[in-house]
Image (tube, rainbow, N blue to C red):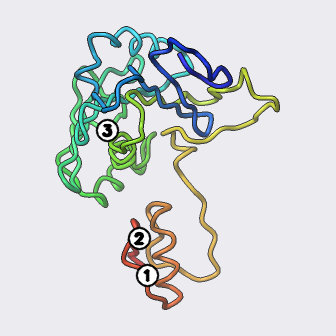
């Protein structure tokens, strides 16, 4: 296993990369050049997935099945399946309801935000689907439990907080403005197009976010 600070392991077949100290990407069978997705990895690595969920530090585990299907697991809360069809998202509990959302019909990006905003994992459907489908994301993605730092053992300076998890306190971002906004941006990607619109400036066409101001 490759993991910071031990970055040399000649026979390693897995690697873990921590981001924000509260999320980590686990890459499996790292000698492969093509991404295999979880169904092809399950037989060999299922025990690792189960072991990760046994750790108190791990809150949510995401297993990408394809660019459009993602299994979500949580300790003591079972598993669910998240599916993306273009810009619509469906969440279906399997053995439980790890995100506490119930069985949801297909939702667009705005509806998915509104359906999850008041819960423990705001905007989790869109965020998980976007993250897990990204070409550079891990074969397993873990989100830390509240109060845990996934690199605390090796940090030279003690941390009093972390970021990067799917938890509510990690997902909500304060926004201060000196001009009134009709509808606040839903996601950080929406901040720039919203600000440009308030200022009366044209937004470039390549922005990921949108403005409803």
3 or 1: tag closer to the N-terminus: 3
Judging by the rendered image, the residue that carries numbered circle 2 is: 207
Q: CA distance from mark 3 to mark 1?
A: 34 Å
Residue 183 disc label = none
- Residue 12 image point, x, y percent: 50, 14
Q: Quadrant of the C terminus?
A: bottom left
In-image side of 2 versus 118 (left or right): right
- Residue 40 image point, x, y percent: 24, 21
Q: For the residues carrying marks 3 and 1, which lies nearer the camera in this image?
A: 1
- The foreground one among 74 and 157 is 157
- Tell me the crowding category of disc 1: few under 14, some 14 to 19, or many 20 or more residues within 10 angstroms, Cα based: some
Disc 3 is placed on an element classified as loop
Position of residue 189 relative to residue 79, above or below, is below
Q: Residue at x 41, y 38 (%)?
A: 137
Position of residue 19 relative to residue 198, above or below, is above
Contact between marks 2 and 1 (CB within 8 A): the answer is: yes
Q: Residue at x 43, y 47 (%)?
A: 122
- Tell me the crowding category of disc 2: few under 14, some 14 to 19, or many 20 or more residues within 10 angstroms, Cα based: few
- Res. 148 in view: no
- Tell me the crowding category of disc 3: few under 14, some 14 to 19, or many 20 or more residues within 10 angstroms, Cα based: some
In-image side of 67 versus 29 (left or right): left
Residue extending furthest toward the front: 10
Position of residue 129 relative to residue 98, above or below, is below
- The foreground one among 36 and 46 is 36
Q: CA distance from mark 2 to mark 1?
A: 8 Å
Position of residue 161 relative to residue 36, above or below, is below
State which quadrant residue 77 falls in.
top left
Judging by the rendered image, the residue that carries numbered circle 3 is: 101
- Residue 202 image point, x, y percent: 44, 87
Residue 203 disc label = 1
């Amino acid at each position: 296993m490759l993991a910071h600070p031990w970055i040399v392991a000649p026979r390693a077949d897995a690697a873990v990369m921590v981001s924000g100290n509260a999320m980590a990407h686990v890459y499996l069978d790292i000698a492969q050049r093509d991404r295999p997705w979880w169904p092809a990895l399950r037989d060999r690595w299922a025990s690792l997935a189960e072991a990760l969920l046994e750790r108190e530090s791990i809150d949510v585990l995401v297993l990408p099945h394809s660019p459009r299907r993602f299994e979500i697991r949580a300790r003591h809360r079972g598993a669910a399946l998240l599916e993306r069809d273009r810009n619509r998202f469906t969440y279906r509990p399997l053995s439980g309801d790890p995100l506490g959302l119930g069985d949801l019909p297909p939702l667009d990006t705005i509806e998915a935000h509104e359906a999850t905003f008041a819960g423990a994992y705001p905007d989790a459907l869109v965020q998980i689907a976007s993250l897990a489908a990204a070409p550079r994301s891990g074969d397993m993605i873990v989100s830390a439990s509240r109060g845990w730092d996934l690199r605390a053992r090796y940090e030279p300076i003690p941390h009093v907080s972390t970021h990067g998890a799917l938890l509510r306190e990690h997902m909500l971002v304060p926004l201060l403005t000196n001009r009134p906004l009709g509808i606040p941006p839903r996601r950080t990607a929406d901040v720039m197009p919203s600000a440009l619109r308030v200022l009366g400036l044209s937004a470039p066409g390549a922005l990921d976010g949108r403005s409803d101001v």
